[in-house]
């Protein structure tokens, strides 16, 4: 007999693969987070309806030119924060860093100026900015954005502010104020910027290298610097309000009067220039405010008027104004303030199945009950009655349905009252009606039974 040789199995070296993780600054929104998102979105949606905003969705990708023209080449967003790339067809594209430019493009391109004006549009969705990730600052974040396009009346400014104000209040955020300013027309701004440059140039020795560069590139943005050392200098700086033309002045005065009328708490802030170039006249931010410490912290929303944006994008002269709510920051505040968001979703019935045939039939029964508008839960993957009853208890249901082999064959089902423990056999064809009848009856506890 030939000698049997044992062949050694070759050892396959398996190298442990590195774990692929998320892109920094971008986040998964896990199921448990949706309690907060659903709570906030339900209020946002309600107010969008109350104020007659129509929903608009634009593509996540746009031509890069749209944002560089609308937001401004010298802004931080366009200069260093856009996720831009050249695609296979050599087209320069950018993941949208904000909604306003896209909504205005869509308004012009789709001829929405032929509708009754103004047109009120709102959108919700993700935006992308390659900012340095930190608390409350992400590379992918979400805004709910409101725009009113086609009217320049100051009452519209107040309306937009009031919508956002109402939403934040309804969500339960009490510690919010509106910082507000007017940056006038581009002509007013030009004159003001010259004066501002002269002012900061006379204090150049007090500026850091980065601040000096900013003074050259975008002098207005020196005003919203967070640098403590610059605070005094900014407080003494010339104020834009002194450079507004008569019409812009009147417009601003009217906006404030309307806001007084609806009791919106606002703080005038001459340094609020905002980081996007398209703004004209009214600008604002909704900021959390601690009045005992006299301290502002999180900007939850921001916006302003942009009467020159349409022309910048090649359209006709059309005024517009809007506000964007930063959803992550709002949700963060909801959590911090422990605002209750859970709406109790009550389940009335739990369906238990035992055996192969019952399992097969229970899918259809479950669906029939949903169609009959009975709130029902199941645990199809569990087989033992004990573990399914435990689930029924967890859901705190009034009735459990038990479908065993016998019942499945006879087209019946056991209905168990979870409080009294009483069980009855019911024909499957009458099940929904029977359950509705029982669920209507007042709850009888065992104690009362005795
Ligand atoms: P914005 O001030 O750039 O304005 O953004 C509005 C809000 O979005 C901010 O107040 C903040 O809550 C949130 N947000 C901005 N960047 C981030 C980020 N990196 N991470 C988390 N949240 C962020 C605009 O976007 C304008 N388009 C608003 C507007 C609408 N103006 C007129 N109409």
Image (cartoon, grey):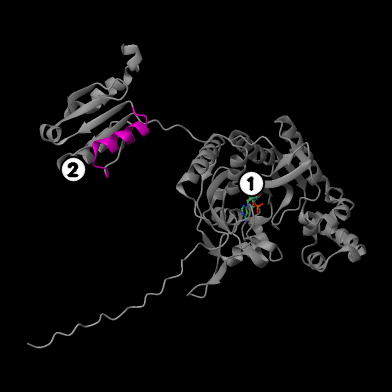
Relative vertical location of residue 387 with respect to residue 56 in this rendering, above or below: above
Label 1 residue near ligand 1, CB within 8 Å: yes
- Residue at the far right: name it: 202
Query: Magenta part of the protein: which range?
Result: 381-397
Quadrant in which the N terminus is drawn: bottom left
Res 308 quadrant in image: bottom right
Residue 87 lies, in percent from the top left, at 50, 72
Disc on res. 211: none
From the viewer's side, name the closer residue of 258 and 380. 380
Q: Is residue 265 left or right of residue 425?
A: right
Label 2 residue near ligand 1, CB within 8 Å: no
Residue 408 lies, in percent from the top left, at 14, 35
Is residue 371 visible from the viewing direction of this image?
Answer: no
Res 151 quadrant in image: top right
Q: Between tags 1 and 2, which lies in front?
A: 2
Is residue 393 visible from the viewing direction of this image?
Answer: yes
> Does dot 2 land on a helix, a strand or a loop?
helix
> Does dot 1 land on a helix, a strand or a loop?
strand
Quadrant in which the C terminus is drawn: top left
Residue 100 lies, in percent from the top left, at 61, 53
Circle 1 packing at 10 Å, graded few (<14), some (14-19), many (20+), is many
Residue hosting label 1:
323
Residue 197 lies, in percent from the top left, at 86, 62
- On whether residue 382 falls in the magenta region, the answer is yes
Residue hosting label 2:
360
From the viewer's side, name the closer residue of 218 and 194. 218
């Amino acid at each position: 007999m030939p000698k049997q040789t044992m062949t050694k199995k070759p050892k396959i070296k398996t190298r442990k693969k590195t774990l692929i993780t998320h892109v920094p600054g971008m986040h998964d929104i896990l199921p448990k987070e949706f309690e907060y998102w659903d709570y906030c979105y339900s209020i946002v949606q309600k107010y969008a309806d109350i104020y007659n905003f129509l929903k608009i969705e634009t593509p996540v990708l746009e031509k890069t030119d749209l944002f560089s023209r609308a937001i401004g080449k010298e802004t931080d967003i366009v200069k260093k924060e856009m996720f831009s790339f050249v695609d296979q067809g050599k087209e320069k594209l950018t993941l949208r860093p904000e909604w306003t430019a896209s909504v205005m493009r869509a308004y012009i391109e789709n001829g929405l100026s032929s509708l009754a004006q103004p047109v009120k549009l709102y959108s919700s969705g993700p935006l992308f900015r390659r900012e340095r990730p930190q608390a409350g600052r992400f590379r992918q974040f979400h805004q709910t954005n409101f725009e009113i396009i086609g009217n320049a009346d100051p009452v519209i400014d107040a309306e937009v502010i009031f919508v956002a104000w109402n939403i934040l209040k309804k969500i339960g955020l009490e510690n919010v104020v509106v910082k507000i300013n007017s940056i006038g027309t581009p002509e007013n701004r030009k004159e003001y910027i010259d004066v501002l440059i002269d002012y900061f140039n006379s204090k150049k020795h007090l500026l850091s290298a980065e601040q000096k560069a900013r003074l050259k590139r975008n002098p207005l943005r020196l005003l919203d610097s967070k640098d403590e050392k610059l605070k005094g200098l900014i407080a003494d700086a010339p104020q834009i309000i002194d450079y507004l033309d008569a019409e812009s002045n009147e417009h601003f005065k009217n906006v404030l009067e309307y806001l007084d009328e609806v009791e919106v708490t606002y703080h005038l802030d001459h340094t609020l220039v905002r980081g996007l170039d398209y703004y004209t006249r009214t600008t604002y931010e909704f900021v959390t405010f601690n009045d005992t410490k006299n301290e502002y912290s999180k900007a939850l929303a921001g916006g302003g008027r942009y009467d020159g944006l349409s022309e910048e994008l090649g359209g006709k002269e059309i005024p517009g104004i809007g506000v964007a709510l930063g959803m992550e920051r709002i949700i963060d505040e909801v959590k911090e303030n422990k605002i209750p968001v859970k709406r109790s979703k009550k389940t009335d019935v739990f369906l238990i199945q035992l055996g192969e045939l019952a399992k097969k039939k229970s899918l259809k029964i479950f669906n029939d009950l949903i169609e009959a508008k009975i709130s029902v839960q199941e645990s199809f993957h569990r087989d033992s009655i004990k573990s399914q009853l435990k689930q029924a208890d967890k859901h705190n249901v009034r009735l459990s349905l038990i479908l065993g082999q016998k019942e499945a064959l006879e087209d019946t089902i056991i209905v168990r009252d979870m409080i009294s423990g009483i069980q009855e056999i019911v024909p499957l064809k009458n099940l929904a009606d029977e359950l509705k009848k029982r669920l209507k009856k007042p709850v009888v506890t065992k104690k009362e039974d005795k």
